[in-house]
């Protein structure tokens, strides 16, 4: 479950947040509820948190200052601000901190729930991305003695699908492949694809592997790297721009995956093209 810290100097508001939001439905748990930003800052230093829900106007330290401290401790923490002041200056600062939501008091439980649902979706996507990356690294390590790129598998998957065009599952597999390539610059997870095609992730993953011979996550990685090769060859885009266009937000990680697969860096590949 995702760990949530609640902070509000109004005890009644704090207790209402803790008691009336269906945290378990959101796969979240309130690990602490603090009535001062100072005590919350001390808690943040020693806790592993995923979500911070905080009031903005508080004595001694504001929620904005607290959020900055939380982000310094954990850049991926998701922040929801609550304020009794409809003040553009506060909203502007909240946006500068990449706040997920800015909610005005008096708080509406449904509005808070909707905001937290969006937070959960963001956390789920990030978790899926990390799982994909870990799975890829396991594949790379397993292939460490044979550094041949995985592209033949990708081409074979396409060929296999073409041969099976008359089958229902093959048609679905081709639609999934088209979906992957259409969203190659975005976060792509099996769960998102399953939701798009109205299937369970387990079924979609098994079906895709059966039809293509390649696991869904492996195919996504291979498709990204194949597209990167194409852009390195056919465009003058900078390496970091290419990384972004094929779904990598971390240039170093993109370069490492590329080199692990092809034995050379993206820059070296471009020079040889």
Image (cartoon, rainbow, N blue to C red):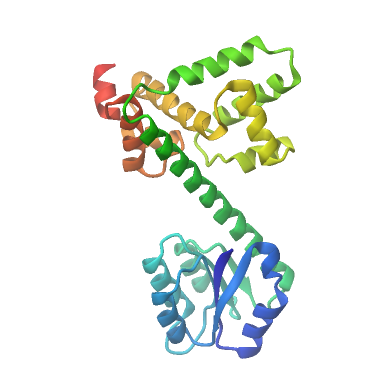
Q: For the point 24% across and 21% down, which residue is it? A: 271
Q: Is 116 placed above or below 197 here?
A: below
Residue 235 percent location from the top left of the image: 36, 22
Up the image or down, 172 lies above or below 158; here it is: below
- Position of 98 with respect to 189 (left or right) is left
Q: Nearer the viewer, residue 122 or 236?
A: 122
Estimate the x, y position of residue 126 in percent, counting from the top left: 51, 51
Q: Residue at x 69, y 13 (%)?
A: 165
Q: Foreground residue, 48 or 241?
A: 48
x 24%, y 25%: residue: 268
Left or right, residue 128 beside residue 226: right
Q: Which quadrant would the N terminus be assigned to in this image?
A: bottom right
Depth check: 215 or 256 in front? Answer: 215
The C terminus, quarter of image:
top left
Q: How many marks?
A: 0
Residue at 49% x, 36% y is 185
Q: Work out which residue is located at the far top of the displayed protein and give it.
A: 163
Q: Quadrant of residue 9?
A: bottom right
Residue 100, horizontal then vertical, whole percent: 55, 62
Where in the figure is residue 131, as x and y percent of width and height? 50, 46
Up-down relation of residue 195 to residue 30 (above or below): above
In the displayed structure image, the side of residue 85 where residue 142 appears, left or right:
left
Residue 176 can be seen in this image:
no
Front residue of this view, candidates 103 and 66: 66
Q: Is residue 15 visible?
A: yes
Q: Quadrant of residue 248?
A: top left
């Amino acid at each position: 479950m995702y760990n949530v810290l609640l902070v509000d100097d109004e005890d009644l508001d704090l207790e209402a947040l803790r008691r009336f939001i269906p945290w378990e439905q959101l796969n979240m748990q309130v690990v602490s509820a603090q009535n001062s930003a100072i005590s919350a800052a001390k808690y943040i230093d020693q806790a592993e948190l995923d979500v911070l829900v905080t009031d903005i106007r508080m004595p001694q330290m504001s929620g904005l200052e607290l959020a900055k401290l939380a982000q310094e401790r954990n850049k991926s923490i998701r922040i929801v601000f609550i304020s009794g002041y409809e003040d553009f200056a506060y909203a502007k600062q909240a946006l500068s901190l990449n706040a997920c939501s800015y909610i005005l008091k008096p708080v509406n439980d449904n509005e808070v729930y909707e905001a937290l649902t969006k937070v959960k979706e963001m956390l789920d996507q990030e978790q899926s991305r990390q799982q994909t990356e870990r799975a890829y690294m396991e594949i790379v390590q397993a292939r460490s003695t044979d550094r041949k790129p995985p592209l033949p598998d990708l081409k074979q998957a396409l060929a296999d699908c073409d041969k099976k065009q008359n089958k229902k599952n093959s048609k679905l597999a081709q639609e999934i492949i088209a979906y992957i390539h259409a969203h190659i610059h975005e976060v792509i997870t099996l769960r998102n694809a399953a939701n798009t095609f109205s299937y369970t992730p387990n079924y979609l993953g098994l079906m895709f592997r059966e039809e293509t011979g390649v696991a869904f996550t492996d195919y996504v990685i291979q498709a990204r790297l194949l597209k990167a090769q194409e852009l390195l060859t056919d465009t003058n885009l900078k390496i970091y721009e290419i990384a972004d266009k094929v779904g990598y937000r971390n240039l170093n990680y993109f370069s490492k995956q590329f080199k692990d697969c092809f034995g050379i860096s993206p820059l070296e590949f471009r020079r040889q093209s």
